[in-house]
């Protein structure tokens, strides 16, 4: 009998669901947008009940699309937007406030206060993370402060808190499973990177009672049964944060294997084996615990990758659609010394300068829009090299090849330039849906549909390999120009006269 796996992907802008058969062929799909709430500038919130409701709808839609019944499904796997936090009532399941989204800056003052109290080093030592409002801890603290009486209720055991995986699993199992996995835990700023459990000392400083928080389990644990939701027993066999699921879906199971996602933002994840690596400018997290072994990862986020194409399209109106960038950029052999540094909201990994602003430099009378568009595409490539340089600087990590995914990898010129500038093969797999496939394949592994990680590696296949076509000297020369341009953008807003 064919075995089917249900994928649950709770993203930031939309929720999706896939049904695959055991050969990993997609037979059903559902997707819906979720509403972004912006109560104030810089604040971003989601309605947790809408996330749950739309997720259930797209799961049912995927089953209908596949023409299968819940009883035909052998396992389910979940992946989710990370860090976003929800606090809800244990007895009713009612959230006490909206979900505070990972990118929201509303909890910056909470983190600033912790840093002022001298907690910065402790946080970094225990969690590996540089204190920031991205991570869940300050969001939970903020909700407990914001809602009248919430702290007392939390202490009395009346409230639960968690990331989106925990919220969905708790609801879909009718409150029977209150769990999260190590990959999600590592992005909360509450989990100890060594013990893979909540860090009691940090929780004490944050004033977050431990009993509010879910149990942290391996990524291939039994996360509960969807029986209360579907009336048929379906084991949830995996839970992974989205970027870690992407790394897993790229079959990057060995130390040094990595993936780069070229979406609106860009994310590099490198499997760094069985102990955490600390690398300046990049973030250590847990990749997963699977079959009893923990794979740590390092991660770097670029604020503007495909975003730069959107800017060319929507604001400069130099292109009609992002894919046009490939044709325009290919009309000139080089940018003739023009560099575009897309530090629109500051420089992200590995440089981290919130005061930097974007720049186009090197413009001459001969510069045309073709050069600017090419420089924009090249910026995606140089920023990736910045992160690879940081990761490999002390020699503890070597990166033999780069596996790529995300919306922009259809751009062949981008992929070729990436191989040229890094001097390593860039590999585009057949399946561009690494994230949800990572979760589904892990669910298949943990429930015995697949026998081993090797089986999963064999299911990952290459569509195209981009080999470097320029010399190392040429690549280093072009990159040196980028570094010079990038350095010029640093600290820009601090150089401007102050306005009242
Ligand atoms: P996300 O999941 O972050 O919304 P996607 O993975 O769907 O993003 O990728 C969309 C991003 O990729 C957009 O920012 C878009 O500008 C960019 N993009 C899409 N196609 C191309 C292309 N052919 N060349 C360059 N950038 C592209």
Image (cartoon, grey):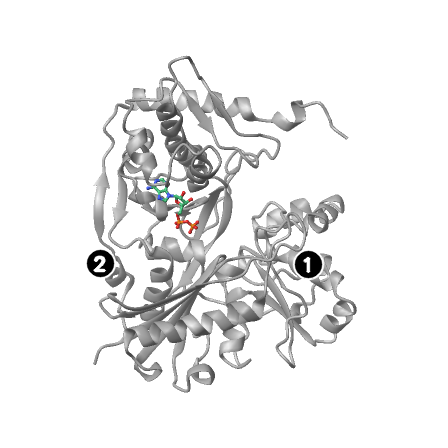
Query: Cβ–Cβ below 8 Å for labels 1 and 2?
Result: no
Q: Quadrant of the C terminus?
A: top right
Which quadrant would the N terminus be assigned to in this image?
bottom left
Q: Where is residue 127 in the image (x, y as percent from the top left)?
A: 58, 52
Observer-side mark, 1 or 2, equals: 2
The image shows residue 479 at horizontal and vertical percentages of: 39, 24
Looking at the image, how many numbered discs can be counted on the residues? 2
Q: Distance between the residues labelled 1 and 2?
A: 43 Å
**Mark 2 Cα shell of 10 Å, populated few (<14), some (14-19), many (≥20):** few
Q: In which quarter of the image is residue 48?
A: bottom right
Horizontally, is 415 left or right of 494 in the view?
Answer: left
User: Where on the image, by quarter, is ligand 1?
Assistant: top left
Does label 1 point to a residue whose CB lies under 8 Å from ligand 1? Answer: no
In the displayed structure, would residue 423 be above or below residue 47? above
Residue 52 position (above or below residue 361): below
Specify which label sits upstream in the sequence, 1 or 2: 1
Q: Which residue is depicted at the point 57% across and 50% down?
A: 103
Residue 70 rendering spot, x and y as whole percentages: 35, 81
Image location (x, y in percent) of residue 339: 43, 24
Identify residue for label 2: 458
Q: Residue at x 29, y 44 (%)?
A: 410
Along the line of sight, which residue is nearer the eye, 156 or 469?
Answer: 469
Query: Which label sits on residue 201?
Result: 1
């Amino acid at each position: 009998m064919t075995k089917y796996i249900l994928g649950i992907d709770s993203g930031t802008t939309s929720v999706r669901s896939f049904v695959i058969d055991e050969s990993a062929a997609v037979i059903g799909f559902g997707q819906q947008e979720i509403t972004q709430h912006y109560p104030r500038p810089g604040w971003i919130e989601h309605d947790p009940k809408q996330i749950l409701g739309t997720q259930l709808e797209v799961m049912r839609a995927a089953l209908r699309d596949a023409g299968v019944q819940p009883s035909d499904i052998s396992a389910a796997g979940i992946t989710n937007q990370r860090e976003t936090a929800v606090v809800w009532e244990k007895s009713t399941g009612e959230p006490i406030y909206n979900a505070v989204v990972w990118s929201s800056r509303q909890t910056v003052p909470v983190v600033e206060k912790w840093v002022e109290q001298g907690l910065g080093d402790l946080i970094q030592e225990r969690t590996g993370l540089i204190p920031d409002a991205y991570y869940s801890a300050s969001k939970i603290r903020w909700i407990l402060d914001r809602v009248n009486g919430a702290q007392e209720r939390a202490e009395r055991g009346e409230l639960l808190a968690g990331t989106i995986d925990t919220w969905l699993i708790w609801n879909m199992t009718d409150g029977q499973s209150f769990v999260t996995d190590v990959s999600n835990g590592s992005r909360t700023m509450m989990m100890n990177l060594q013990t893979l459990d909540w860090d009691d000392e940090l929780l004490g400083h944050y004033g977050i009672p431990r009993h509010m928080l879910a149990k942290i389990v391996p990524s291939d644990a039994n996360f509960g049964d969807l029986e209360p939701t579907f009336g048929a027993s379906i084991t949830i066999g995996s839970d992974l944060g989205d970027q870690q699921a992407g790394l897993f879906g790229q079959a990057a199971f060995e130390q040094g294997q990595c993936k780069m996602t070229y979406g609106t933002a860009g994310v590099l994840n490198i499997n760094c084996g069985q102990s955490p690596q600390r690398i300046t400018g990049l973030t250590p997290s847990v990749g997963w615990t699977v079959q009893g072994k923990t794979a740590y990862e390092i991660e770097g986020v670029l604020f503007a990758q495909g975003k730069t194409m959107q800017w060319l399209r929507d604001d400069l109106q130099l292109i009609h659609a992002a894919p046009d960038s490939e044709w325009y950029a290919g009309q000139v052999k080089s940018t003739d010394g023009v560099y575009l540094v897309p530090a629109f909201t500051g420089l992200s990994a590995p440089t981290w300068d919130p005061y930097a602003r974007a720049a186009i430099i090197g413009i001459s009378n001969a510069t045309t829009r073709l050069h600017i568009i090419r420089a924009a595409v090249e910026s995606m490539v140089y920023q990736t090299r910045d992160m690879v340089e940081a990761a490999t600087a002390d020699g503890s990590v070597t990166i033999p090849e780069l596996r790529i995914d995300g919306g922009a990898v259809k751009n062949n010129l981008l992929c070729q330039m990436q191989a040229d500038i890094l001097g390593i093969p860039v590999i585009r797999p057949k399946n561009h849906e690494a994230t949800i496939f990572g979760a589904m394949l892990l669910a298949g592994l943990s429930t015995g549909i697949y026998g081993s990680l090797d089986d999963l590696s064999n299911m990952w296949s290459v569509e195209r390999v981009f080999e470097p076509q320029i010399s190392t000297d040429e690549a280093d020369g072009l990159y040196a120009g980028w570094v010079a341009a990038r350095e010029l953008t640093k600290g820009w807003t601090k150089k401007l006269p102050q306005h009242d």
